[in-house]
Amino acid sequence: SSISSMLEVNGIEVIYNHVILVLKGVSLAVPQGAIVAILGGNGAGKTTTLRAISNLLKGERGEVTKGSIELRGERIENLTPSELVKRGVVQVMEGRHCFAHLTIEENLLTGAYTLRDRADIAANLEKVYAYFPRLKTRRASQAAYTSGGEQQMCAIGRAIMSSPSLVLLDEPSMGLAPQLVEEVFNIVHDLNTKEGTTFLLAEQNTSMALKYADYGYIMESGRIVMDGSAHDLARNEDVKEFYLGMG
Ligand code: ATP
């Protein structure tokens, strides 16, 4: 295994409910400091791939039955989600998962549950507010009364509260107006360049993802069918024909 990759997924298979083979040998690599996108349509297996990495399949009655997952050269398949957070791997789930009855600030603070030092927590909160000024304005509002875009920002902000090195981001564009999608991707780009945070994101919005990512993997029916630099994928005729109208 190469230690130049922060994350390496090697030939994983995932089965749901003991019978349904959903990932049929998926391999991918995420270099330190990169933004890598997993692209593809509905049901291609993007979410399942992210969940396999962050060990969130159990609640879905899924399991990795073959292959390996390595973080900085170390196997991580048997680590719990919270052990993964302590090692810097955090997932932002699809559909914005904020606690509706908590305020924006309370939601953000729940993301710091692995940190002990109050000063670190306060510093991270200020950092999140610097990246997401909208969240600062809305800090005392109950999440239920904030917009879809604010809740997506809150979910990403909550992940940032744990000082992650690798963020797994599932469909950041989902349900957002185009202008907000651009705003969210801009913040991902800023976190990547200024904090050095590595991102692995799943997106159906191919054109937006390829605009911000360094590298992309295209999935179909549980397999990677194409991969390349975002620059090359955006110019590939098949990608243009089959994917660039989507999202
Ligand atoms: P989407 O954008 O719709 O989330 P996706 O590319 O993320 O698509 P997955 O959610 O990973 O795809 O789903 C891949 C396949 O696994 C689909 O056929 C889906 O129906 C199936 N699947 C997902 N979750 C489960 C589950 N808990 N039990 C059984 N099958 C599942």
Image: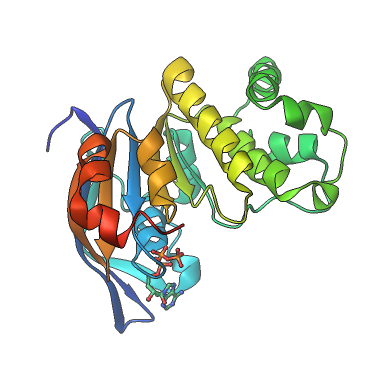
Q: For residue 213, which quarter of the picture?
A: top left
Q: Is residue 111 visible?
A: no
Is residue 201 shown left or right of residue 191? Answer: left
Q: Quadrant of the N terminus?
A: top left
Residue under the image location 63 percent in, 33 percent down: 112
**Residue 53: where, in percent of width, then height?**
35, 51
Q: For residue 16, which quarter of the picture?
A: bottom left
Residues 119 and 99: in front is: 99
Residues 232 and 2: in front is: 232
- For the view shown, which residue lies furthest in the left direction? 1
Residues 150 and 82: in front is: 150
**Residue 181: where, in percent of width, then height?**
57, 42
Q: Quadrant of ligand 1?
A: bottom left
Q: In the figure, 138 relative to 27: above or below?
A: above
Residue under the image location 39 percent in, 81 percent down: 17
Q: In the figure, 103 relative to 161: above or below?
A: below
Residue under the image location 46 percent in, 27 percent down: 189
